[in-house]
Image: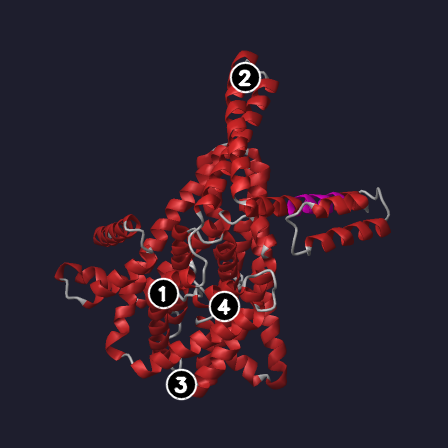
Amino acid sequence: METQFELVLLLLAIAAGITAVAKKWRQPYPIALVIIGVVIGLMPYSGLEELKETFAEDEFFHFAIISIFLPTLLGEATLNLPFSHLKENKMPILLLAVIGTLITFVTAGWMTALFLGLSIQAALVFAALMAPTDPISVLSIFKSMGVNHKISTVMEGESLINDGLAVVLFTIAAYQYDVILDAGTGGIGIALGEFFKVVIGGLLVGGAFGYFFSRLTTFFDDYPLEIVFSMLLFYGSFFVAEAFHVSGVIAVVIGGIIFGNFGTRIGMSPTTSLSIRTFWDVASLVANSLVFLLVGLEITRMVHSVNWIQVLIAIGIVVLARSIAVYSTISFIRSLPKNWKHIFNWGGLKGSLSLALALSLPIDFPFREEILMLAFGVVFFSLVVQGLTIKPLVSLLGEKATKEEKLEYDRIQSRIYRYHSGRKQLERMTAEGTLSSIVYNKLVDQYDGELKELNEELERLYQQEPELRKESTARAIKQALYAEHEALEQLERRHLISNQITEEEKRFIRDLLEREDMGDQVALHEHKKE
């Protein structure tokens, strides 16, 4: 036990060192970890032989990724993803995550059986392994470049949903295939029934856990305890869902979204919310660092038995299947710039979940070794080649780093928001009697002076960059219309106006929201005239 603990610390130290160097040089640390992991695995470092033997075992890798790291990574991602961002980008997210995943599954499965000679079942299993995306490397690159946040939101939202669906498809293909085949024409019904059972079951478990722990936080203002609640939420929902043979991944995603949005709003103080997010940020960094180093170590196991021709064919199949899925689902969404679709396509990297699922296949599973070899080859190509070329691609397509004017605008806006929030807190403290009016007036004067200067800077920036004013106006109009729509729904629930009028007004608001040009302050004025 002591030796195992020392090996874990050694692995963590190596991962932390590589991550620190990569971040210092502003390079994507997941790719650096994979490459160093492969180097460690291939080179005869006598002092690391025991570490390689321990952590490259199939059982350990699968257990670490699925049972330890996956709930952490999913939970942290959902906590930091506002529901409003998901709602705003729901169409491309759902199209990519649901329809795109199914298209990838079917096309990759068909091509694998046709060109690589695997059985139908083995081809479908491989296709399911290639369906989930791992955007961590890409998102770290986007963050350093200042790429439009909507691209990151869509890619992260897609990953959260398609991870769950891919696991469901893998389970059906690997373990339900014979039952479905024996049922003949009724097999389609069995497959669909199993699919919806696992998905809906995961939604129910995650929803129940998320709501329960969100409500539980309202009874406490103790951030260490509430951090424990979040741990119980993520790991509890995952293992309970798995115990009932429904999707643990979907359960964690739904539970985390509810907890990170509803729970934060109703039951967490600012200190608690910040502490929980900070804790999971640290946990996610540790998990990611270890995961990608383990991926590098694991990949080296297959080097000596690789059929490079088959791997190259598999890479072509996966890239083509992803391209078909992306361009056939979101090409008709007019609100998405054309260049973004190329980024979504090439940025759909494969990662640790694919390898962990592949390693979970029984030893006697037909074509198991071929599936492992192909999965390892595609994941390595995806993380290293696609990961290293996504940045030049983004620059080539014109989605380069955010303009300095936009960064300055964001800086001013963030300070205005901060100062207004601080001023409101002082008002609340004064109303409660916990702050004297003398201190209040002095501090408020400081805030007002800062806000006046910031608004003057903002006006100068608007004059230099009229497009910023237009974007800000469009965003404000959209948020105002959403608020109007919510107000109408409240009136409808309270039966204060007729359903006919409610539907007319809501339809008018939806028409305004669908307008492409909302940056000229016309929409709200037209609404008032109506």
Task: Write the residue at 35% across / 59% down.
Answer: 64
Q: Does the magenta segment cover residue 240? A: no
Residue extent of the magenta highlight: 478-488
- Observer-side mark, 2 or 3, equals 2
Q: Which of marks 4 and 3 precedes in the sequence?
A: 3
Q: Is there CB contact under 8 Å for labels 2 and 3? A: no
Q: Is residue 333 left or right of residue 243?
A: right
Q: Work out whether mark 1 precedes mark 3 in sequence or the reverse, and give the earlier one.
A: 3
Label 4 CA crowd tier, 10 Å (few <14, some 14–19, many 20+): many
Please give the label number shown on residue 440: 2
Q: Distance of mark 1 from mark 3, alpha carbons? A: 27 Å
Q: As shown in the figure, which amino acid type bears the numbered disc 3?
A: Leu
Q: Is residue 243 above or below residue 129?
A: above
Q: Are marks 4 and 2 in contact (CB under 8 Å)?
A: no
Secondary element type, mark 3: helix
Alpha carbons under labels 1 and 4: distance apart: 25 Å
Q: Mark 1 Cα within 10 Å, few/some/many (few <14, many 20+)? A: few
Q: Which residue is mark 1?
A: 389
User: Where does residue 267 sit, x and y in percent of width and height?
Assistant: 57, 37
Label 2 is placed on what type of residue?
Tyr
Which mark identifies residue 166?
Answer: 4
Mark 1 or mark 4: name the one nearer the start of the chain.
4
Q: Residue at x 53, y 31 (%)?
A: 456
Residue on which the image places disc 3: 116
**Secondary structure type for disc 1:** helix
